[in-house]
């Protein structure tokens, strides 16, 4: 797994767990007995033709209109599954980790995640979760903090 190698090289503490395959961020929250607000859900969008990773809490949806104004784009739309598969060839579709920097994607994080002490996310497969300190995540990814949920 690319993300775990990255975390190991960075020397950060993290914990991995295995669970039955889940296919949504809310499913991950349930499987890990974690509040959905601490589960990071990466959503890939195209903003004026360039890809952007948007990370938000599991229970929330992305507000493309809000995002559009904050990334100074004429158009913002969700990337389709085929595009996502090409961007994340080492991940199961829908289990991408919220590390856009590992895939040459600018990353933005929803402001509501900013104050959390930890973050939980899928580790590239539908049966593996990674939990780590939010401070370490922010230091490694250096995401831009925006407000784009509803």
Image (spheres, rainbow, N blue to C red):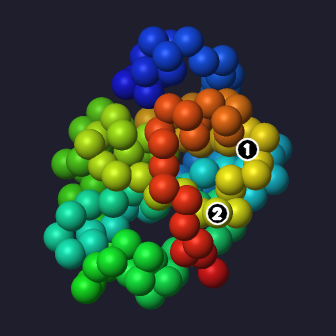
Residue 22: numbered disc: none
Q: Which residue is disc 1 drawn over?
A: 31
Measured as percent of width and height from the top left, residue 43 is found at 44, 61
Q: Could you tell whether 124 is left or right of 106 in the image? A: right
Q: Nearer the viewer, mark 1 or mark 2?
A: 2
Disc 2, SS: helix
Measured as percent of width and height from the top left, residue 113 is found at 68, 56
Q: Which residue is disc 2 drawn over?
A: 111
Closer to the camera in the image, 80 or 31: 80
Give the residue displayed 45% in from the left and 12% down from the top: 9
Q: Could you tell whether 66 is left or right of 91 in the image? A: right
Query: Would you say residue 55 is visible in this rendering?
Result: yes
Give the residue displayed 49% in from the left and 16% down from the top: 10
**Image quadrant of residue 41?**
bottom right
Closer to the camera in the image, 118 or 60: 118
Q: Could you tell me which quadrant the C terminus lies in?
A: bottom right
Q: Is residue 135 above or below residue 76?
A: above
Q: How many C-alpha atoms fall within 10 Å of the one at disc 2: few (<14), some, or many (≥20)?
A: some
Query: CB under 8 Å between callouts 1 and 2?
Result: no
Measured as percent of width and height from the top left, residue 138 is found at 57, 40
């Amino acid at each position: 797994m690319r993300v775990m190698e990255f975390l190991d090289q960075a020397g950060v503490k993290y914990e991995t767990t295995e669970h039955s395959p889940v296919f949504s961020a809310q499913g991950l929250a349930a499987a890990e007995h974690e509040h959905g607000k601490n589960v990071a859900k990466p959503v890939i969008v195209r903003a004026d033709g360039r890809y952007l990773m948007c990370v938000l809490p599991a229970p929330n949806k992305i507000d493309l209109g809000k995002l559009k104004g904050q990334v100074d784009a004429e158009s913002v739309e969700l990337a389709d599954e085929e595009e996502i598969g090409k961007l994340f060839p080492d991940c199961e579709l829908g289990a991408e980790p919220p590390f856009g920097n590992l895939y040459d994607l600018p990353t933005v994080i929803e402001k509501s995640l900013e104050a959390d002490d930890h973050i939980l996310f899928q580790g590239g497969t539908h049966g593996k979760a990674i939990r780590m300190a939010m401070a370490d995540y922010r230091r490694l990814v250096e995401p831009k903090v925006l407000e784009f949920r509803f």
